[in-house]
Amino acid sequence: QVQLVESGGGLVQAGGSLRLSCVASRSGFGWYAISWYRQSPGQERTLVAQLRPSGGTVYKGSAEGRFTISRGDASNTWHLEMNNLQPDDTGVYYCAAPTNGGTYWGPGTQVTVAS
């Protein structure tokens, strides 16, 4: 079993930046990808960015060009750097890691962007 915990959310003005972090309870658990999802009020959870073990990245929608997903210095840590945040970016951000044993999810961190 692996636990993921997100941090770094908060309240920011439009145009500001936040850096989210995802920390796993252990490293080497065979993840296929590290993904960040956002669930905005009244909407479904949607993929924002994904990092593959090869280092390849995927960005969806308006995250392209504004967000950067990366590994941290520790092997069990990943980040989502978010720049030029807009009110539409408001929501709960979840870290997810699919593995052979299923997908692990963190509890989420709230990001609120004020106009």
Image (spheres, rainbow, N blue to C red):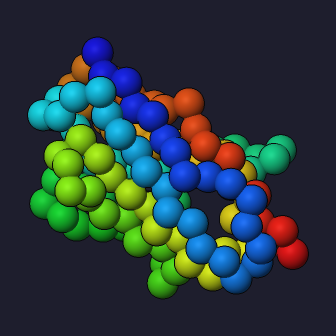
Residue sitting at x 26%, y 56%: 72
User: From the viewer's perspective, is residue 42 above or below residue 105?
Assistant: below
Q: Residue furthest top?
A: 1
Q: Is residue 61 visible?
A: no
Q: Is residue 100 left or right of residue 108?
A: left
Residue 44 on image: x %, y %: 69, 44
Q: How many marks?
A: 0
The quarter of the displayed image where residue 25 is located: top left
The residue under the point 33% across, 52% down is 78
Is the N terminus in the top left, top right, bottom left or bottom right quadrant? top left
The x and y percentages for residue 67 are 48, 73
Instruction: Please tell me in which quadrant of the rendered image residue 61 appears.
Output: bottom right
Q: Residue at x 49, y 56 (%)?
A: 20
Residue 40 location (% of width, % of height) = 74, 51
Tell me if residue 2 comes above or below residue 44 in the rendering. above
Q: Judge from the rendering whether residue 107 lies leftward or rightward of residue 40; answer left or right.
A: left
Q: Residue at x 61, y 52 (%)?
A: 9
Snapshot quadrant of residue 83: bottom right
